[in-house]
Image (tube, rainbow, N blue to C red):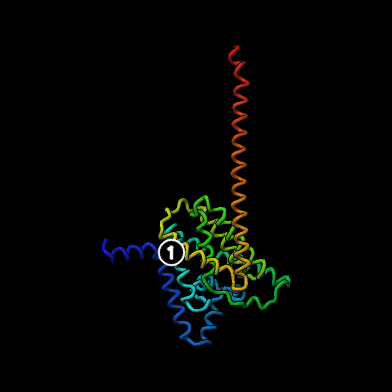
Amino acid sequence: MPVLPAMLSGVARVRVTMAYALALSAVAIALPRLGPGMQDQIIRHASTNLHNLSHGRVGTLFGSAFVVDAGPILYWLPGLVCLLALGELLWRSGRLVVVFVAGHVGATLLVAVGLTAAVSRGWLPTSVAHATDVGMSYGATAVLGALTPAIPSRWRPAWIGWWLAVALAVVGVGRDFTAVGHLLALVVGMVVATRFGSPRGWTWNLFALLAIGAPFGFLVLASEGTLVLAAVCGLAGAILGMAVARAQLNWSADASIQSERHASGGSSSSSPGISQS
């Protein structure tokens, strides 16, 4: 196959990822050129905080995903592209959009409900209503969760245990609403992907994307001060997940053996009656 058509075919298979990456790049390049004052104003208006949502600015639910305030774009865009491309190649373009939007919007609204309750009861200061909340992290975390059904069944319990433990550890230490949102988005992605059916088969290219996308997902969940704790808890969660899966397998095997014994016992006990008749 000629090189150019092959490249175009490859890009077409990850068209949603590439379009989103280009949009993020355009915004990231344009914002600094507008000056600090205008940049801060755009970020405030795009934030999915309680102030904006309570004033009916529902457009922030979508616009916030295109404004990333996470440092230089070269630090985070390559990892994001690998993660989204992996999800798109495994589940196709339409399903990538579904899980990204479900995680981004769903986690945002759930966090907003929790914050509203906390502020109304005096558990959090009212200033949290104006907190900056933009970026792609909820959607990206949902895509990370959506990889779960595609992971080979042998390693899936460890995968689930690792990511849930990492997210819970960060929530427990940081007690930050963004960390809670990441946990919710992760679960949303896992649940939504159970309806996607069978994914594409794994290839070496997909494993390479996973090798870059998974560490990026870890850095999205764990901040600089929680990296070591999150990794330790993730390892413990992975071991626990494998142990639980092994225990369930052993229990199923024992139940199957017991069932066969009862069946064979019932059959043999009824045999004499049949022969005498």
Image quarter in which the N terminus is found: bottom left
Q: Amino acid type of disc 1?
A: Ala
Q: Return the residue found at the far top.
A: 277
Q: Badge 1 is on which residue?
A: 85
Against 121, residue 271 (above or below) is: above
Comparing 158 with 177, the one in front is: 158
Total numbered circles: 1
Task: Residue 178: name its quadrant.
Answer: bottom right
Q: In percent of the image, x 59 and y 57: which residue is there? A: 238
Quick check: can you spot residue 104? no
- In the orientation shown, which residue stands out farthest toward the right? 122
Q: Residue at x 59, y 52 (%)?
A: 242
Whole-percent x, y for residue 177 in the image = 63, 70
x, y (%) of residue 194? 52, 53
Q: Mark 1 falls on what kind of element?
A: helix
Mark yes or no: residue 212 visible: yes
> How many other residues sit within 10 Å of disc 1, few (<14), some (14-19) or many (≥20)?
many
Image quadrant for the C terminus?
Answer: top right
Q: Which residue is drawn at the image coordinates 48% and 61% (left, top)?
A: 98
Q: Is residue 212 left or right of residue 107?
A: left
Q: Is residue 238 above or below residue 274?
A: below
Q: Quadrant of residue 183?
A: bottom right
Q: Position of residue 191 (x, y in %)?
A: 55, 56
Q: Residue furthest left?
A: 2
Percent coordinates x, y for residue 250 in the rendering? 60, 42
Say if 174 sits above or below 233 in the image.
below
Q: Identify the residue at image location x=67%, y=66%.
A: 172
